[in-house]
Amino acid sequence: MDVLVGLTPDDAADAEESERLTRRLVAELRNLDLYTLQVLSDGAPPENSKGDLVTADAVALALSAPGGVLTSLVGLLQDWLGRQSARHRVSVTINGDTIELEQATPEERRQLIDAFVRRNGAGGE
């Protein structure tokens, strides 16, 4: 399964802070069971992808994941956002279907994530 993760730092974050956030997120993603993890610059979609998958100001990560990792990925991103002091946004795109995660109530995030995983996990994992 090919997944594109976009990180859009809070408006108050400067370039150095954005880079630091990206490094920390990538370090945590490396703990997942992934086939590949590719860091992209300037929101450019991965080679051979179709369409503009993230906004130009987002930092994107392209991953190819084995089955069963989608729930773990989204849980990791949700946890990571919850530990941040600023309002950063993370988007996850699979086959053109995008979910945007940001700091919200746990119940709102759970409902959003459950629906996304159902749409993309059943056939893709």
Image (spheres, rainbow, N blue to C red):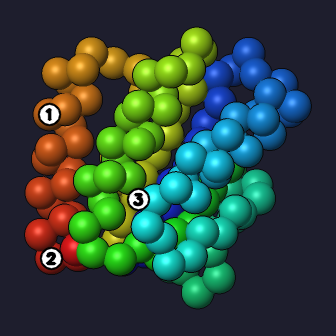
Per the model, the C-alpha gap separating discs 3 and 1 is 17 Å
Badge 3 marks a residue whose secondary structure is strand
* Side of 97 where 57 appears, left or right: right
Per the model, the C-alpha gap separating discs 3 and 2 is 15 Å
The amino acid type of the residue labelled 1 equals Gln
To which residue does mark 2 refer?
123
Farthest-out residue, right: 16
Quarter of the image for the N terminus: give it.
bottom left
Quarter of the image for the C terminus: give it.
bottom left
Badge 2 marks a residue whose secondary structure is helix
In the foreground, 50 or 83 = 83
Image disc number at residue 29: none
Circle 1 crowding by C-alpha within 10 Å: few under 14, some 14–19, many from 20: few
Estimate the x, y position of residue 18 in percent, counting from the top left. Answer: 76, 34
Q: Is residue 17 visible?
A: yes
To which residue does mark 1 refer?
111
To which residue does mark 3 refer?
93
Q: Residue at x 69, y 20 (%)?
A: 11
Q: Earlier in the sequence, mark 1 or mark 2?
A: 1
